Image (spheres, rainbow, N blue to C red):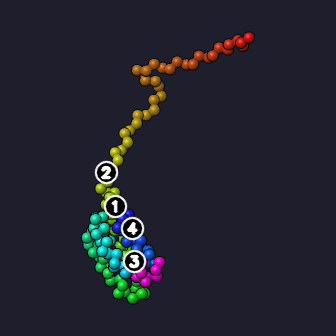
Amino acid sequence: MLPSLAQLQKYLQAEIGHKYSNKAVIGGLPKMLSFWEPNARRDGLAPDLVDSLAVRIRAYPELPLDKRPLAVAELLDLVKEANAAVMAQKQASAPRPAAPAARPPAEAAPRPDRPAPRPAEPRRAEPPAR
């Protein structure tokens, strides 16, 4: 996950933990946009996505308390969708490893350019030392 998306996800999870009181960030969720937006743009997120998320976050404090859980859930869904799109794009642009070279079949008979191995000679028993 891109750092900016992971960061936003943490803020939203914290907001859930604060029971949607807009206190996950000192001064409210919109306060974090001053540093989150530039980070998201540096990460290469689509400008329209960054703008859409920012508009929703700026509107969050004005929402009635009963509408905030849905708003946070929608923001989290957007974060997950954006992450999935980024990961798919990275996989599509990543170089694929070359297919492994085909191995020749195991040889049953010795190759003609090598002599056949000699069978081992049985060891002779030596008389016991006196």
Report the magenta residues as a range: 17-26
* Residue 87 place in picture, x, y as percent: 35, 61
Occupied quadrant, residue 112: top left
Q: Secondary structure at mark 3?
A: loop
C-beta proximity under 8 Å, tags 4 and 3:
no
Judged by depth in the image, the label closer to the viewer, 4 or 1, is 4
Q: Badge 2, how many Cα within 10 Å: few under 14, some, many 20+? A: few
Judged by depth in the image, the label closer to the viewer, 2 or 4, is 4
Q: Nearer the viewer, residue 105 or 34?
A: 34
First-in-chain label (2 vs 1): 1
Q: Amino acid at mark 1?
A: Ala
| Real-space Cα separation, disc 4 to disc 1, in angstroms | 17 Å
Q: Which mark is residue 6?
A: 4
Q: Amino acid at mark 2?
A: Pro
Q: Secondary structure at mark 1?
A: helix
Q: Residue at x 33, y 65 (%)?
A: 85
First-in-chain label (3 vs 1): 3
Q: Residue at x 46, y 80 (%)?
A: 18
Let me know if residue 120 is in the magenta part: no
Q: Amino acid at mark 4?
A: Ala
Judging by the rendered image, the residue that carries numbered circle 1 is 88
Q: Quadrant of the N terminus?
A: bottom left
Let me know if residue 18 is in the magenta part: yes
Judging by the rendered image, the residue that carries numbered circle 3 is 25
| Real-space Cα separation, disc 3 to disc 1, in angstroms | 31 Å
Q: Residue at x 36, y 68 (%)?
A: 5
Q: Main secondary structure of the magenta part?
A: loop
First-in-chain label (3 vs 2): 3
Q: Amino acid at mark 3?
A: Val
